[in-house]
Amino acid sequence: MREKYVRFCVSLPKDLLEELDRRTVLRGYSSRSELVRDLIREMLIEDMWEREEEDVVGVLTIVYDHHDIRLVSRMLDVQHKYHVNVLCNTHVHLDHRNCLETMIIKGKASQIEGLSTQLAGMRGVKFAKLVKAGKPEK
Ligand code: NI
């Protein structure tokens, strides 16, 4: 069933509205309303991560040097420790030395952040970024 939409009025400084419109075009949104809806959903997901009441989903991207066998072994140990949370793992050989991995992780925000922090902090991990996601409530 199609959701009911409600129009409301927002007052913004002219410069801020121009920035909103610029981003609406740059990010390929069909309208400023669609951009504002996504911004609100992003805020709701951020709040879900703060509340810790329900499961959320995160995508962790890491780049590391696979020549460091101890690092690879330590990373696997940590992932196995959190096996309930790691839903899937994609590995790409970026070049002779570097590997890129993405992990889709589900669970309580603190578990996801704990796993991400452990992996990101390992010596030899050159890049790590966690994208916070979740099922939007609205
Ligand atoms: Ni590789």
Image: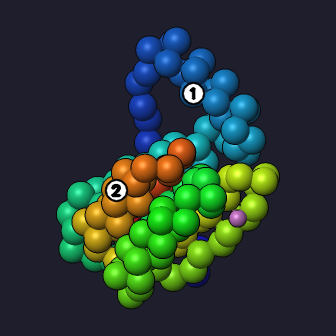
Question: How far, Cα to Cα, is label 1 from label 2?
Answer: 33 Å
Q: What amino acid is at disc 1?
A: Leu
* Residue 33 placement: quadrant: top right
Front residue of this view, candidates 31 and 54: 54
Colour setup of the view: rainbow
Front residue of this view, candidates 52 and 8: 52
Residue at x 29% of width, y 71% of height: 111
- Measured from the top left, where is residue 118 in percent x and y? 34, 60
Q: What amino acid is at disc 2?
A: Thr
The quarter of the rendered structure image containing the C terminus is bottom left
Front residue of this view, candidates 24 and 107: 107
* Residue 115 placement: quadrant: bottom left
Residue 133 appearing in the image = no
Q: In this view, does 20 lie to the left or right of 98?
A: left
Quarter of image, ligand 1 = bottom right
Query: Total marks drawn?
Result: 2
Disc nearer the start of the sequence (1/2): 1
- Measured from the top left, where is residue 97 in percent x and y? 71, 52
Residue at x 50% of width, y 50% of height: 124
Q: Which residue does the numbered mark 2 point to in the structure image?
A: 117
* Residue 1 placement: quadrant: bottom right
Residue at x 72% of width, y 32% of height: 26
Q: Which mark is residue 20?
A: 1
